[in-house]
Image (cartoon, helix red, strand yellow):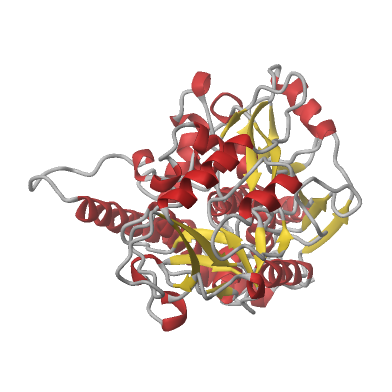
Amino acid sequence: MEWSTLPLATTRPGRVPNGTDVPLSKSCRERYIAVMSEPLHIVGGGLAGSEAAWQAAQRGVQVVLHEMRPSCGTFAHKTGKLAELVCSNSFRSDDDEHNAVGLLHWEMRQAGGIVIEAGDRHRIPAGGALAVDREAFADAVTSRLLSHANVTLETGEITNLPEDGQWIFATGPLTSSALGEALQAESGEESLAFFDAIAPIVYADSVDMSVAWEQSRYDKGETQDERKAYINCPLTRDEYEAFVDALLQAEKMEFRVGETARYFDGCLPIEVMAERGRETLRHGPMKPVGLTNTHAPDQRPYAVVQLRRDNKLGTLFNIVGFQTKMKYGAQVNVFKMIPGLKNARFARLGGIHRNTFINSPRLLDEQMRLRSKPHIRFAGQITGVEGYVESAAMGLMAGCMAAATMTGRSLPPAPHTTAIGALVNHVTGGAEARTFQPMNVNFGLFPPIDARGGRRGRRDRYKAYTDRAKRAWTSWLATSGLDAAESTFARTSVSP
């Protein structure tokens, strides 16, 4: 058997998934053993790093996962667990027929992704979204990875770019300053960055339900729990105006001298939104549409603040879209102005932090490798994708690409008509390097749908995108040996 035709999930020389021995030449066997004895090093135990580690380990590659926490912490992380969610607990829409994020969920499920599997296992009611119990989710990913025979965890900070070996850097937006300096020295340019913000979390029993009510927008959800997944706090016009005034006048966190990074539009602090116009919040996170106040069904609120369940017990709720850079004391005072939250107790207050990313279209090739050091790949938010699921998807691809390289396989590019393929294409050359900024997955990254047959309505057009993507992704997985069935084999067949 030629080296290039060895199965991706093979875990020992001379064995294939059905257990049949195949004759390998001495030189082929020696080459295989030499490559497989070399571990894949993955730096960063967030969503991208965890997913990359899982994909590579499932395909017989020995993985050393490097995580600097808990010995070296960050502003946003609270534990040393893998895949800790530091901002929202939502993976956003789970609609795989009309939404690009939902399609990304679907593609990752078909590829046997650990992040989406843990998300499904620990999902909590959130209407049409996939929201998770963040602690149970992180525990599940950590447990699965640390119990895998091919994964070793090493704690401690990696501060430079190694000169040899196979590496994936998935250090996320909170890359340490030392590693950031090494990246800057290698790229020869200033690090790109934006500011990201975190929303507060409230104890459910401190919300006044004689004012607030439970309902998902437009009553979305298949079960009663799903249709009542959110707590809604109504505001009159006067209450809304007073709230906006308080936001604008509140004391804010100041940036350090010389910090000029911009915000990511999909995660703007509420004060910044308010500064863009007094009605901005009413057309954003505080829009009152699709909701009926059960305490006054004939009165439409002027604005509504929504709280989404943050854990399976339903004891914690985060304030949806309320990322903030207000100082802690100001947050308490301003948020208690919201009807229903007068006596609120906060499990976590909001905050702001700097997110670092690289100029991927200039620095990375189509295999997500650093052009100047092709033994190093990058994955996750540091590549310039934005969002939990997007980050994990980039980890999935980086792990599969690295595993293919290390097992002598050639992995064809994922079709650009798929959500994952469109993201990889965007960050590795589809975007303009001169103006590169972080991007969520969206149908604008996909090749246009053939317009034959007349104009399509938006839902029909989105359905055409997802139908095409599913066909392409299913075919690509099958021809690449990356389908979930192959991963299942690897999970049950890892041998010393």
The quadrant where residue 10 appears? bottom right
For the point 52% across and 22% down, the residue is 433
Depth order, front residue of 340/201 = 340
Using residue 263 as the reference point, say whether residue 180 is left or right of it.
Answer: right
Q: Position of residue 490 (x, y in %)?
A: 63, 70
- Seen at 58% across and 36% down, the residue is 248
Q: Nearer the viewer, residue 357 or 395?
A: 357
Return the residue nearer the eye: 234 or 403. Answer: 234
423 displayed left or right of 332: left
Looking at this rendering, what residue extends furthest in the bottom direction?
A: 224
Camera-nearest residue between 32 and 304? 304
User: Residue placed at 64% from the left, 79% from the top?
Assistant: 313
Position of 291 relative to 451 (above/below): below
Which residue is the extreme one toward the front? 238
| 153 sits left or right of 477 in the view | right
Residue 133 shows in this picture: yes
Where is residue 285 drawn, in percent x and y?
Answer: 46, 51
